Image: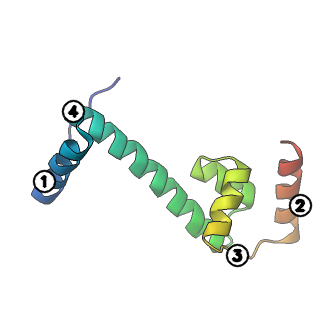
Amino acid sequence: MPSISARIPDDDEAELEAVIEILDEDKSTVIRKALSEGLASLRRRVAIERYQSGDISVNQAAHLAGVSIAEWLEIAREHNLTTHLSPDDLDADAAAAREL
C-alpha cells in the first residue's frame, strides 16, 4: 500500500482527532475511511451534476459514480433528477440495461 503525506489545516486536524476518538480507531484507518468515503461522495456529486445538465447518460453516470445502473437509478430517484438526453442516448441506456 503506497504512503501519502499531506498537510491539513488545524481545524481539519482537530476534526480528525475527534473522529478518531468517536470511532476508537487509529489515525491511518480513519484517514483511509475518510478518503474512501470522500472520493465516493465526490464521484457521485460529479455524476449527479453532469447527468442533471444532460452531459452524460444513465450508463455513463453510473460508471462515473462507480455504481451499478440499478444503484444509479436509485440515486437519481432520491435526488429527483431529470435530464435532457436525446432519444439516441436513451436507446443506448436501454441497450446497456438489457445487457445486465
Q: Which residue is mark 3?
A: 82
Callout 4 secondary element? loop
Q: CA distance from mark 3 to mark 2?
A: 16 Å
Identity, as a three-letter code, of the amino acid under mark 3: Thr
Q: How many residues crowd mark 2 within 10 Å: few (<14), some (14–19), many (20+)?
A: few
Callout 1 secondary element? helix
| Sequence-first tag of 1 and 2 | 1
Nearer to us in this view, 67 or 85: 67
Decide if residue 1 is on the left or right side of residue 41: left
Identity, as a three-letter code, of the amino acid under mark 1: Ala
Callout 3 secondary element? loop
Q: CA distance from mark 3 to mark 1?
A: 39 Å
The N terminus lies in quadrant: top left
| Sequence-first tag of 4 and 3 | 4
Query: Which residue occupies 13% across, 59% down?
Result: 11
Q: Position of residue 40 (x, y in %)?
A: 48, 49
Q: CA distance from mark 4 to mark 2?
A: 49 Å
Callout 2 secondary element? helix
| Sequence-first tag of 1 and 4 | 1
Identity, as a three-letter code, of the amino acid under mark 2: Asp
| Sequence-first tag of 3 and 1 | 1
Q: Which residue is mark 2?
A: 91
Query: Which residue occupies 58% across, 65% down?
Result: 48
Q: What mark, if any, has residue 14 been given in the picture?
A: 1
Q: CA distance from mark 1 to mark 4?
A: 15 Å
Q: Which residue is mark 4?
A: 26
Query: Which residue occupies 73% across, 54% down?
Result: 59
Nearer to us in this view, 5 or 15: 15
